[in-house]
Amino acid sequence: MKIDHFAFEVSDLDTSLKFYIDKLGFKLETTFMDPQEHETLAILETAGGKLELIQVLDENNQPQKFEPITLRKHFCPHLALQMDDIEKTLIHLIGHGVTPVRGPLEIPEMVKWFYVCDPDQNVIEFFQDFQ
C-alpha cells in the first residue's frame, strides 16, 4: 500500500490553481468537470505525490456556497511537504506573497517547519528533516 494523493475542497478552482502552480510550484496533471457528481476538480503533481482540488457544484453544476475550514490550534488536517532547504522555501514563499500562519518552529538538530494556508484556509506544512 502507498499513498496516492491528498484532497482539499476549494471555493474557486481557478484561484486555487494559480496559488498551487504559481506560488507553490505544483504541476497541473488534469482538470475535469463531473456533471453527475456535481464537482469540478484538478489533479496536481509534485515530487512524491499528487494533490486533488475539488470545487463542489450545485444541482445545476454552478459553484456551490463554500464554507472555509476553521483553523485549529494544531493545524489539522494539513498537507505536509518535505523540503531540502526550509529557509530557501520560506524566502521563496514570502517573495510570492505567502506568509506563514505559524512558524518557523524547530526541534534543534531534528526538524524545522512552518504552516501556510491556501486561499480557502487549507493548511500546508513545509518541513525539513535534519536526521
Image (cartoon, grey):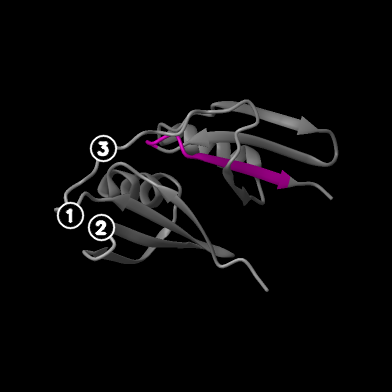
For mark 3, does the 10 Å Cα neighbourhood hold few (<14), some (14 to 19), or many (20 or more) residues? few
Residue 122 within the magenta-colored segment of the rendering? yes
Pinpoint residue 96: horizontal percent, then vertical percent.
41, 36
Q: Earlier in the sequence, mark 2 or mark 1?
A: 2
Which mark, by number, is residue 79?
none
Q: CA distance from mark 2 to mark 1?
A: 6 Å
Residue 47: tell me if it is visible.
no
For label 1, the SS is loop
For mark 1, does the 10 Å Cα neighbourhood hold few (<14), some (14 to 19), or many (20 or more) residues? some
Q: Residue furthest bottom?
A: 1
**Can you identify the residue that label 3 sits on?**
65
Magenta span main SS: strand
For label 2, the SS is loop
Q: Earlier in the sequence, mark 2 or mark 3?
A: 2
Is 10 positioned to the left or the right of 103 in the image?
Answer: left
Front-lying residue, 34 or 60: 60
Residue 74 within the magenta-colored segment of the rendering? no
Quarter of the rendering occupied by the N terminus:
bottom right
**At label 3, which amino acid type do we have?**
Lys
Depicted 124 relative to depicted 2: above or below: above
Front-lying residue, 57 or 128: 57
**Can you identify the residue that label 1 sits on?**
61
Residue at x 58% of width, y 28% of height: 72
Q: CA distance from mark 1 to mark 3?
A: 12 Å
**Can you identify the residue that label 2 sits on?**
38
Stretch in magenta: 119-128
